[in-house]
Amino acid sequence: MVHTVSHTEPLQCSADGIWEACKHADEILPALMPDYFTKSVFLQGHGEPGSIRIVKMGPAIAHAGEVKERMDKFDDATKTLGYTVLEGDPRYSSFSAELKFLPVGETTCEAVWTATYEPVGDMGPPEHIKQIVVLVFKTLEQAVLSRKTLSHTEVLAASPDAIWEACKHADELLPKAMPEFFASSTFLQGHGEPGSIRVVKMGPAVPHAGEVKERMDFFDDANKALGYTVLEGDPRYHYFSAVMKFVPGPAAGTTDAIWTATYVPVGDMGPPEHIKGIAILVFKALAGAAKAD
């Protein structure tokens, strides 16, 4: 017989904030909850519906070494995700769950967890899983509350239109213009549109990272703005995303290039001044390409 259990947890952060943190749960949870989650590896896909992942559990979950899950839903519009356990939990012949984040105010929300399950024998409701889910919600809430930002504006001697056009070709341009920083850029999914996944192989001037996996969050022609999130490859931050925007500068034919990063540092790691420095060099490389054209 199929049963359902649900729980609602009030959180002191916005629904938008915790939904964004949820997109990084595979990196955040092993870092902040190592007793429960050791590692999460995708066997298929990158988190979109139909993706398959293996979650390796920590010592606090003695019954399960690892669990194989299928992502059934990941809906940005409703801030809802759903998954089904395919293998790894012998207590239930079937188990699926849905998590949804509902705004309550500008800075608060409710996290709703609903599980549907078929127990084996006389196994009771998954109260133990519910308790872990509550800890997950609280951990993601803490990650949101510890987010920080860093911003910089650089004036470039080229028009916003010219800079933006160069930006559309950055994956080919930067390895040529800045090979010491960027060796190559390869798309694993998509071609640069929102939701695309790319791997950027770093050059010798970036010794901490061999390669970085990024997701393109938006690419807005009308406002000449783009945003991306680091999915893997920078151990200094639990979470890192950045926005670049190009607007008319102080004089005709110039551009204000605005870079804003949002990040959650690991330990006492400071602001990403090193990444800001690379972003400034990227802006100058784009301006150089724009003027050359």
Image (cartoon, helix red, strand yellow):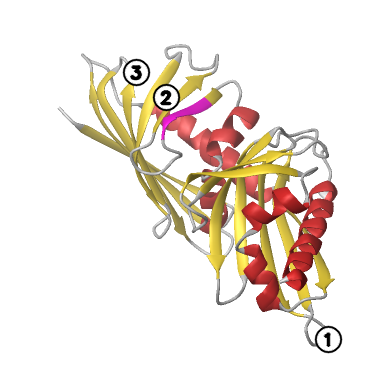
Query: Pointer 2 and pointer 1: residues touching (CB < 8 Å)?
Result: no
**In the image, residue 91 lies at what x, y percent?**
30, 16
Q: Main secondary structure of the magenta part?
A: strand
Q: Position of residue 84 (x, y in %)?
A: 31, 32
Out of 157 and 259, give the one closest to the viewer.
Answer: 157
Separation of marks 1 and 3 at Cα, in angstroms: 64 Å
| Residue 128 marker | 2
Say which amino acid is labelled 2.
Answer: His
> Image quadrant for the N terminus?
top left
Magenta segment: does it hold 3?
A: no
Please determine whether, in this image, residue 175 is positioned above or below residue 52.
below
Q: Which amino acid type is marked by label 3?
A: Asp
Q: Please provide the residue range marked out in magenta.
A: 40-44
Tell me the residue that label 3 is attached to: 89
In the displayed image of the protein, which residue is found farthest to the bottom?
252
Q: Mark 2 or mark 1: which comes first in sequence?
A: 2
Q: Secondary structure at mark 2?
A: helix
Provide the residue designation for mark 1.
251
Front tag of 1 and 3 = 1
* Label 1: few (<14), some (14–19) or many (≥20) C-alpha neighbours in 10 Å: few
